[in-house]
Every structure is written in C-alpha cells, then in structure tokens.
Image (cartoon, helix red, strand yellow):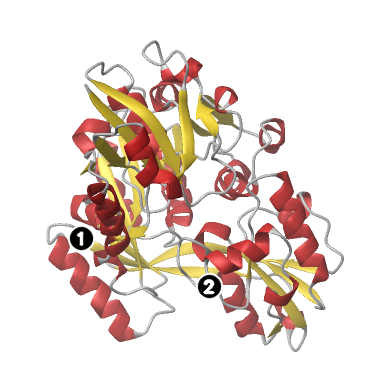
Amino acid sequence: MANVIIMGAAGRDFHNFNVYYRQRPQDRVVAFTAAQIPNITNRSYPPELAGDLYPQGIPIYREEELPHLIADLKADQVVFAYSDVSHTEAMHKASLALAAGASFILLGPDATMLRSSRPVLAVCAVRTGAGKSPLVRRAVEVLQGWGYKVSVVRHPMPYGDLREQVCQRFAVPQDLDRQACTIEEREEYEPHIRAGTVVFAGVDYARVLAQAEAEADIIVWDGGNNDLPFFQPTLHIVIADALRPGHELAYHPGEANARLADAFVIAKANEAAAEDLTVVRKNLAALNPAAPIAEAALRLLVPGGESLRQRRALVIEDGPTITHGGMAYGAGWRAAQKFGADVVDPHPWAVGSIQAAYEQYPHIGPVLPALGYGEEQMRDLEATINAVPCDVIIVASPVDLRRLLTFHRPSFRITYDLEMTAGPTLEEMLAPLRQHRRGC
C-alpha cells in the first residue's frame, strides 16, 4: 500500500481524491496540503465525503509543512492537484517532494474526467483571468438561442463547511446568500444567475453532474483558473490572453489545456500590441496546429464614465485575476485610464489580510483585489476601501460588491462583454454541438 499526500487548493485535490482514490484500497491518502487560498487549512476532509475507507476523514495541512509530513506520515507519493502555477514553480514543488524521498505525480485526464450522458462544452484557459466567464455567457446565449436547455457547472470553490457544499445549485441571488457564498464564489456565479442561467458547483462532481444532467440538454463546464475540465468534453474551447504573450507555454496546466483544445479564442485582442498578438497565435499554432484560432475583444461598459475625469478613484479588480493570475491590474484600471480618472494607490491603507495579500503578491499595481474568502477578510476589504482617500470607487469585480459591503463614497460599476472580432464565429465553433438532438 502506498501512502499518498495530495497537494491542492480546495478544488482539484478533492476531485482527484473522489474519482481516483476514494475507492482505491491499494493506496492510502494520509493528508491534503493547501495553498493559494486562505483559511482552508487546519480542518479535514470529512468522513461523510471521504468514504468507508476513511472513517476518520483526512486532515488538511499547510503546504509549507510538506517535507515534514512526508517524513512523519511515511508518504510514498505526492500528487500535485491545483492550477495556475508556472512550470518552474511546479518543478520546484516536485523537487521538494523528491528531496524528501517521495515520488511526484500528476494525474491525467483519463484518470480524472467524468463522462456525461449529455454533450459537454468545456471552456478553459491558459491563465486565470483570460476571459472564460464572458465567453461562457456568450456560448450559453447561443445554445439557448438554438433551443437547448443548458446547465452551467462551475469549477469548485468549497471554502466553507464541505459537508454542506457537496452539491450546490444556484438559480436566484438569494441562493448565494442562503449558502453563505464568498466574494470569490459570487464573482463566478452571479453573472450567470443575472442572465437567468442555473449554476451548479460543489465538492462531489459525480453528484453535481447527475443533478445538472437532470435539468439540461447540454452541460457547459465553466473552468476555474487554467485547470483541466472535470468532465470529458464533447467540445473543448480554450481561451488565451493577448495581454500575456508567452504564458500559453509557461503555466501548468494551461499548456496541457492548449494541447487538448478543439478551438482557441484569443481574448483582449483589441487591447494588445500587434506583435504580442502574433506571438500568442504562433505559440498556439505550434502547440496544437489542428485547432482553429479566433480573436475576441472585451468591451468595457462604464455607465456615466465621463464623470470620472480628473477624479481621484480607488479601483477594485477581480480578485483571482490580480492575485495568483499574476496581472498588475485589470478592467477597472483600464476604465480609469480611458476616462481620465486619477488612480489612488490603496497599498498604504491596506488592512489585515489585504495587506498580507499585497505582501504575498508584490506584482499587484495601484489597484485593490476584491478578496473575500470569509467574513473576516470581507471586513478587512471594507475597511481598506473606506480608508483610501478618494472621490469615487470603480468596481470591476464581476459581483456587485455594493450588495455586500458599505461604501462611504460614490461608486461606478464596470462590466464587460466579449465580442468575436476575427476568425471563426462562436456559432461556427459551437456547430458540432448542434448534431446532438435536444433531450437525448
């Protein structure tokens, strides 16, 4: 019997355990380690989810403890199971495990993808913040326009009580409140709900898939970060970012997504330098020459934006894009530049866990990531927002933070839509799904 430690971030790690290890008596998962996300350590994967082989559940430790855990728990294997890390960082983690005497393993798609009774459209990316969610929303519009019932299944974000998050369904905004969703969860679910689409997520994706299948003709997988799909795709569209040329070659598992893609969309093509766009196209064609490449623009929508000129503005950006997504700024900063606002750097007024995030991610520019992985961090975020000396607040998070936090200054909400600008249209990309009869 091999003793196994799974390195994760409360998503892919639990999925890999559920589909590969939970009923596998020849291996013994002795621990999870957690990274990237705050407040997910010092708890356990509960026995109710871990199954008959794990009546005590499985403990979750900080990733920094890995070398000691390998020794203390006599671990034979370390399974890497989270996303959006550079190839260099992934191999540093491999070296850490190897130096402690354990094998380092990546489970592949055949071992971890569930098969659906419905056609599956998977929308994934080469990096966090590339533009998956706007493309998913446009794809859902097209499929619904063709008469299909669609269920969106979102990559997991189980940051609360795992026993209460086994299989979640979100149909109305009140579902977000009832299930005590974090800001990060709301950023992903709320835009779909506003568009009238039901979203499923959770911890046990066999159960999530079964419920989604019961309500839909087509399943749309809305991927998280740059992770691989949990479901075997009928059609796999992968997003690259024109503002981050070369990243399609340099991050795990984004490069694997690119090599698996049936089609590519290069987002933010309207904002990129021509030479950067050429680099991205060339790299994608080299990785996967059979996949057609389209280009898309992300159009900023800023009602009343003209009144921002020469006003001191605090810019709040989508959290994951600005933190482990590696971008210094996002749509909010670009809107401020477009309308002539004077951006106030919030770093000096950061409170508690927000200050810690700036220290952890020193690349962040003069913007505030919308971090809210729990009530304490949401309080820190609110305190930081109201401490910054500004005239207005520009909110570019996909969730309307004004429903969750109290602002002491006027605010402007930034949204954005995706528009295909070159190459195959989205309808042409989705055409293979039309051969599947509704309700089959």
Q: Would residue 240 appear left or right of 305 to someone viewing this image?
A: left
Q: For the point 61% across and 84% down, which residue is it?
A: 337
Residue annotated with mark 1: 292
Along the viewing direction, whichever of 380 and 233 lies nearer the viewer = 380
Please report the residue visible at 59 percent of the width from the left and 44 percent of the height from the top: 39
- Judging depth in this view, the residue of 141 and 258 nearest the camera is 258
Q: Is residue 186 left or right of residue 55?
A: right
Which residue ends up furthest to the right in the rendered image? 408
Left or right, residue 390 beside residue 398 = right
Q: Which mark is residue 181?
A: none
Q: Residues within 10 Å of mark 2 (few under 14, many from 20)?
A: few
Residue at left offset 69%, top offset 38%:
173
Q: Secondary structure at mark 1?
A: loop
Q: Which corner quadrant holds the C terminus?
A: top left
For marks 2 and 1, give the CA distance. 36 Å
Q: Which residue is mark 2?
A: 362
x and y percent of residue 424 in the render?
A: 27, 61
| Residue located 83% across and 56% down the image | 406
Q: Which residue occupies the foreground of this view, 399 or 40? A: 40
Q: Secondary structure at mark 2?
A: loop
Residue toward you, 1 or 155: 1
Q: Is residue 87 above or below residue 203?
A: below
Q: Residue furthest top?
A: 52
Residue 424 in view in this figure: no
